[in-house]
Amino acid sequence: MDLDREECPEFWELRLYVAGQTPKSIEAFANLKKICETHLKGKYRIEIIDLLENPELAKGDQILAIPTLVRKLPEPVKKIIGTLANEEKVIVGLDIRPTCKM
């Protein structure tokens, strides 16, 4: 079965904005990693941006709360705020289609 590129992008670039190693930041990363390994295995990159170390980076993606996940690729950019504990909401929010499961 040949999947359309629009339906199943080749690569996902994700940024997780956090502020230090707080319990919520750690939970958000763990949840994101689990979701990516389940639905995007081998097709994603997670960049962690700690705003305590680089506060100026919040401006570029207009980060107003943390933790915040930003989907840079595939476009359009999408954002999800919180610990990403609700897998279904994250999948819908990131627009991961069922055809992308490996």
Image (tube, rainbow, N blue to C red):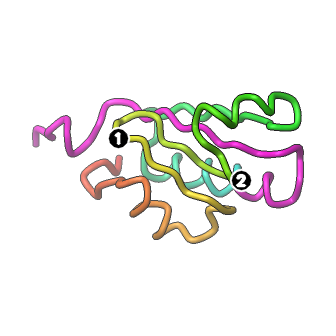
Image location of residue 8, percent across then percent down: 26, 42
Residue 30 is inside the magenta segment: no
Image location of residue 27, percent across then percent down: 76, 58
Mark 2 is on which residue type?
Answer: Pro
Mark 1 is on which residue type?
Answer: Pro
Residue shown at the point (55%, 57%) measured from the top left: 80
Image location of residue 79, percent across then percent down: 51, 51
Residue 11 is inside the magenta segment: yes
- The stretch of residues the image draws in magenta is 1-28
Q: Is residue 60 above or below residue 76?
A: above
Q: Which residue is mark 2?
A: 67
Q: Is residue 57 above or below residue 25?
A: above
Q: Which residue is mark 1?
A: 76
Q: CA distance from mark 1 to mark 2?
A: 20 Å
Asked if labels 2 and 1 touch by Cβ distance under 8 angstroms, the answer is no
Residue shown at the point (48%, 42%) measured from the top left: 71
